[in-house]
Image (cartoon, helix red, strand yellow):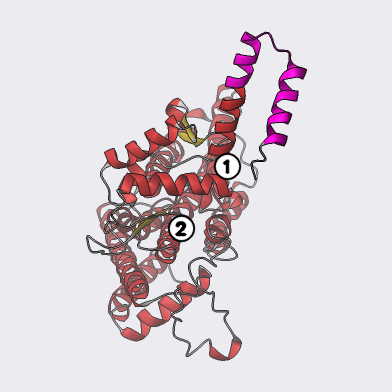
Amino acid sequence: MIVVDPRSAVPPFEQIRVQMVAQVRSGELAPDARLPTVRKLASDLRLAPNTVARAYRELEQSGVIETRGRHGTFVTPHADPVRRQAQAAAESFARQAAALNIGVDDAVRLIRAAFDAEPIR
Amino acid sequence: MVSGSSVLLFFGVVGALGAIVSLVVVRTQAWQKKTFLTFANKVTLWVADEVISAAVTRRLRRSATGTAVGALIGIGAVAVIVVMNPTIPWRTTAYLLAFPVLFIAVSAIPVALALRDELYVHTENSQRVARTNHVEVRDYISPGRFWAPPVLGVAALMLVALGVVLSASGRIDGQRFFGSPTVPWIAAVLVVLGLGWAAARKIIRGNQTATDGLELAWSDAMRADALRNLWTLAAALAWFAVVVAGLGLLGALEVPIEPLWASTILQTSATWGAIVISMVYSRGSAYSYFRYRLWPDLGDVGEIVEDSDEDVDDADVEVHRP
């Protein structure tokens, strides 16, 4: 469920975006879950369709949701935004390592060393 | 000996009187309160506040008024047709005309209300909620109830196809079969089923404005009730279509083998089938299926007040909002 407060200083599209990301991360919105259409969500929330469309567009750009043509809009199968960012970073690192002729084993060793040298948590 | 047309007239008059009485009764506070509590129990939503109970009571009252007005219109329509065609046999009138017309008439206005009415009236600055997952008709009607009308409709079509095959092979009198009301009647039923499906989709796509989850849950309850009405109508009409197709086949038999016996069984089964259908669509999880699909846990919108034996009669709907 999504809540929009028209008196909030946060614009409605941002309220929608933030809550949807939170729902995807918490699992309330499961991977591959179908979302309501822009028009339907806009009419239920008594907002302009453009407002909801903007929230959907931004969610799509950040890989949280995807549009499957006429079938509708769905939560991306691996839609955890943090995981997606980590995956993008790993892909970038893998590309750079390949360009430097570093093999998989060496690359993994480098990552492990980086984790050991600078614990993230 | 009481004639069949007298029986039909008797039921018509009793039905019209019942509808007029219910038009008066629905305006009383006692009826409205009792109906709301009964509905709350059926949909297993035991939580509400003044806004919700007022909105739901208003909708239930308007829906009951619509049903009574629809019944009057249906009885009037049947009466006009019977007066204009006094030679129609009363059994044909009852099974092919009165039942379907009445079913359609009493369902049409409540469904139209569900299509047009906004359940709640909100101010511009009030909080708004909406669900983030897509819902379908099947979220409101259990699988068995959902598939009953199409299965019965297909059965009726298969009987018509059987009639075509048998008349082509000379087993039945094709002219009598196609001259009977079977084919136009089933075509009309299919049109009504198509319109019903379109109305159901429109209900699902319609606005559901609410300020919190509980209001949304009650809105779902009203939506489920409108869809339940539509599916009851669809199942009853599809069942009548099966009976009409069967009667058409029996009437077209070249060598009648106890046709009266078989026809009587079919005509009786039409009535019993309608009774069974109305029970299937009004008992068990008919009203509350949506709760298990869409609201399995209402913890985030309020505490569920369990019903108890001692306070059923005088319990007002509890106000337990977070």
Image quadrant where residue B113 sits: bottom left
**Residue in the foreground of this view, choosing between A55 and A33:** A55
Residue B230 drawn at (x, y percent): 43, 53
Residue B186 at x, y = what percent? 45, 39
Name the residue at 32% across, 53% down: B115
| Residue at 68% across, 8% down | A101
- Which residue was labeled with disc 1? B151
Left or right, residue B77 beside residue B134 = left
Q: How many marks?
A: 2
Residue B199 in view here: no
Tell me the element at label 2.
Answer: helix
Q: Point out the stretch of residues depicted in magenta.
A: A92-117
Instruction: Answer left or right for B26 relative to A21.
Output: left
Q: Is residue A113 above or below residue A27?
A: above
Given residues B139 and B251, the one toward you in this image is: B139
Q: Residues within 10 Å of mark 1 (few under 14, many from 20)?
A: some
Disc 2 residue type? Ala
